[in-house]
Amino acid sequence: MNDAERLRRELRAAREELIRKQSDHTDETAPTASCLPLMPGRDEAFLRLALMSREELETHVERLERDLDDLEGGIDRPEE
């Protein structure tokens, strides 16, 4: 698996975790399972995302999107 695919997988997992957290905050009386019946289970490779706050996840998603854009745009490493 290449770097772009890894970034895409982590970005997808981060977005899904952010949706879970947003759902938890909007309806705290109902269990998450009933709110999101089609939500896939957490990817075990990215369980650390569950420990992040909503704000941290939002920032992480932005970084991943930027990194993926840079990688696809041909920027491998920033100039030192």
Image (cartoon, rainbow, N blue to C red):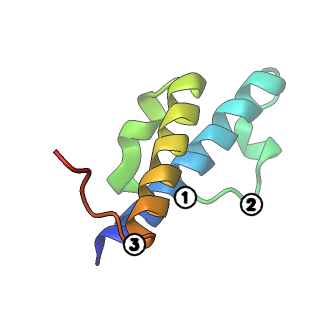
> Which residue is most to the left?
80
In the rendered image, which residue does mark 3 sit on?
5
Q: Is residue 72 above or below residue 41?
A: below
Quarter of the image where one finds residue 29: top right
> Viewer-nearest of labels 3 and 2?
3
Q: Nearer the viewer, residue 27 or 10?
A: 10
Looking at the rendered structure, the number of numbered marks drawn on it comes to 3
The kind of residue on which mark 1 rests is Arg
Q: Nearer the viewer, residue 37 or 73?
A: 73
Residue 41 position in % (x across, y down): 55, 56
Q: Is residue 55 above or below residue 69?
A: above
The kind of residue on which mark 2 rests is Leu
In the rendered image, which residue does mark 2 sit on?
38
Instruction: Name the residue located 58 percent from the left edge and 34 percent from the top edge.
Output: 58
Residue 8 position in % (x across, y down): 47, 65
Q: Nearer the viewer, residue 16 or 75?
A: 75
Query: Few, some or many C-alpha atoms within 10 Å of disc 2 (few <14, some 14-19, many ≥20)?
Result: few
Task: Give the Cα distance between marks 3 and 2.
Answer: 23 Å
